[in-house]
Amino acid sequence: MNNNATTGDSSASDEQSGRLSDFAYSAIKEQLTRGAYKPGHKLPIRSVAEMLNIGSTPAREALNRLVFEGALVMAGPKTVIVPHLDLAALYEVTQMRLALEGLATEQGALRATKDVVDKLLALQDKITLSLEERRYSDALHDNKEFHFTIYRLCEMPHLLSTIEALWLRVGASFHDLYPEFAEAKYGVRNHMAAIEGLVDMDPSAVRAAMESDIRDGYRRLKKAAQERLKRQ
């Protein structure tokens, strides 16, 4: 037997498995940050593997990484679940979001071009239509892109990765915003105020609008968490 060949085959296999694991991790992470799954949604290893057309090993590794990061919790030996954030975790994430997303907004606001503003207006049109038609998952998908289109203007990659980690924790909980948040149009008003601030080249106004969006959302999410506690 050629031991070198065997070792080489094993290394290649490990490398491929690692790439597939990274692919699965990125795909599921993106789904979570965009609110594709509601709290309580189960993700069996087999289902994830089939959905992404990969083997069970890289699917398991990806899910384990997300469990370690607190985005998922174990619900059995081969299944994880999307958790609800409790009140303490929700408060902590919100305080961090206010500080970090506010910083990213203010740092990047003066870099907004007409193309950026046009993109934000188009995204908001899609969000508004989704809310009117009660397609809340679609609204959340575009909501993430709206926020990060503004945050990316800061050109601070480490700050952005930290903000993404926070959205990974809270993304699924955004489903608790609806239908109240849609009916009251809190998000629509805040987003339009942010766009107006970008047009006026007023970083403080843009930051205030985005922080208002986070605070309004927190009040609704906190109420939903308190209602769950009463039902337990």
Image (cartoon, grey):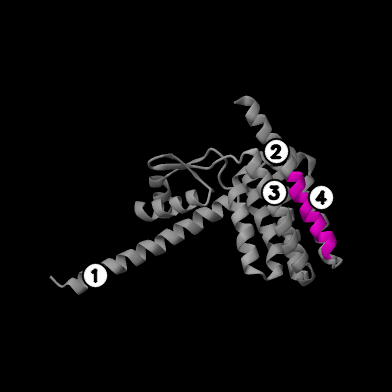
Marks 2/4: CA distance? 20 Å
Q: Is residue 212 magenta?
A: yes
Residue pointed to by mark 1:
7
* Amino acid marked by disc 1: Thr
Check disc 3 and report its element: helix, strand or loop.
Answer: helix
Residue 178 seen from this side: no
- What residue is pinned by disc 4? 189
Label 3 crowd (10 A; few <14 / some 14-19 / many >=20): some
- Does the CB distance between marks 3 and 1 fall below 8 Å? no
| Drawn side of residue 125 relative to residue 78, left or right | right
Compared with 191, 175 (above or below) is: above
> In this orientation, which residue lies closer to the viewer: 197 or 131?
197
Nearest the eye: 129 or 55? 55
Residue receiving disc 2: 222
Instruction: Specify the segment rendered in magenta.
Output: 203-217
* Mark nearer the viewer, 3 or 4: 3
Q: Report the residue at 69% width, 42% height from top.
A: 133
Q: Residue at x 81, y 55 (%)?
A: 209
Q: Residues within 10 Å of mark 2 (few under 14, many from 20)?
A: some
Q: Which residue is mark 3?
A: 94
Q: Is residue 155 magenta?
A: no
Location of residue 223 by image quarter: top right
Q: Is residue 220 left or right of residue 9?
A: right
- Residue 150 point in image, percent of width and height: 72, 63
Label 4 secondary element = helix
